[in-house]
Amino acid sequence: MTNSTLVLSDLIDYTLDELYHELEKSRVTQLGAALGAATTTFTLIGYDLVSVTDLLEIGTELMVVTEKSNDANPTFTVIRGYSSTTAVAHTTSEAVLVNPYWTRSLVIRALQQYFTGPAIAHLPLIRSEVMTTVDVNNVSQQLIPLDSDVIRVLSVRYSSPTSARIIDLPGWRFEDNLPTAVSSTGMGLRVGAAVSSSDDLLVAMSARYLFTGTGEAATVDVPAGTEDIPPMYASCRLLSGREVSRLELDRLVESSGEQGARQGSNIGLVRLRWQEVYCRIDEAKRTITVPRPIVFRRFQRG
């Protein structure tokens, strides 16, 4: 199974494209000068678009305008890091969104909910690595420590250096409650005594979806062929305000418009979009092959 690497900033942009029609997008202006992480006053290019109490979004940081001077090129005073976002430095001419309906921080939260929920439940991330057992004082421990993102081990195979054959290895066991003195993550792969530290083992495992890196440059691996599902799920979750299960879809009828009116969304459209999400998940599941452990049984002598 091959995986693809996605960048967080691209996932956010794709989700916002799913949410907005072109004419619905927020007003956009630009910073007049670079902005430090602790600075609370600045100027804007296109200042006429911004008023007191407006919500501004620069990158993933939110700010609230508290003052606007009467100068020809007015200075704006803001509250930084609004709504639990982080105040960071920004560059000259960086885009400033005015009163965005869907903020990037909200989109990030919805994407994270996808990767910690339905992605793990329905679309396992399978990773294969070449591993060897560890030695302590030149004594083999018959154990391979595993990373904290591993959910379970799916298969273990031995790669023969002489014949180049790959053989399924019997007698292994996935341990998830080891002392930290043995494995810093508490997880490991126990193998039989016949395996030495010089043997290469091909280990297939299912792992959690984790972002690596910082900010919007962070990346996440997903199974190939599922790249479009995270933005689809995140946009549907934001439109409906929560995850709508398959069992609830039949009850999401047009007549129950009160919730849709409060959220500014069409319930019938939301229902169709959730159906598309679950159809794509079902299609993707059929393309993911999960290795199944081979059960070795001893033959009884007659």
Image (cartoon, helix red, strand yellow):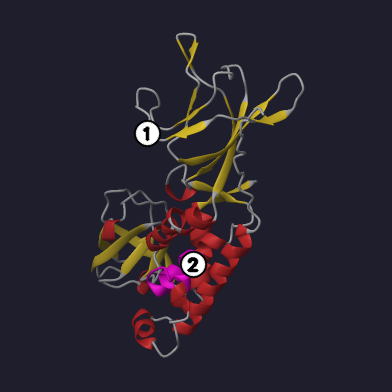
**Closer to viewer: mark 2 or mark 1:** 1
Q: Main secondary structure of the magenta part?
A: helix
Picture coordinates of residue 278, whole percent (x, y):
54, 68
The quadrant holding residue 111 is bottom left
What amino acid is at disc 1?
Asn
Residue occupying image coordinates x 57% and y 44%: 126
CA neighbours of label 2 inside 10 A, class few (<14), some (14 to 19), many (20+): some
Picture coordinates of residue 269, whole percent (x, y):
50, 81
Classify 2 as above or below 248.
Answer: above
Instruction: Please indicate whether residue 188 sits to the left or right of residue 67 in the image.
Output: right
- Check contact, mark 2 vs mark 1: CB within 8 A: no
The quadrant holding residue 149 is top left
What amino acid is at disc 2?
Leu
Which residue is tagged 2? 16
Which residue is tagged 1? 177
Classify 46 as above or below 152.
Answer: below
SS state under label 1:
loop
Residue 276 falls within the magenta-colored stretch: no
Q: Earlier in the sequence, mark 2 or mark 1?
A: 2
Give, as a single range, the part of the protein colored magenta.
233-246
Picture coordinates of residue 34, whole percent (x, y):
38, 51
SS state under label 2:
helix
Residue occupying image coordinates x 41% and y 68%: 243
Instruction: Please indicate whether residue 255 sits to the left or right of residue 158 in the image.
Output: left
> Residue at the left extreme?
66
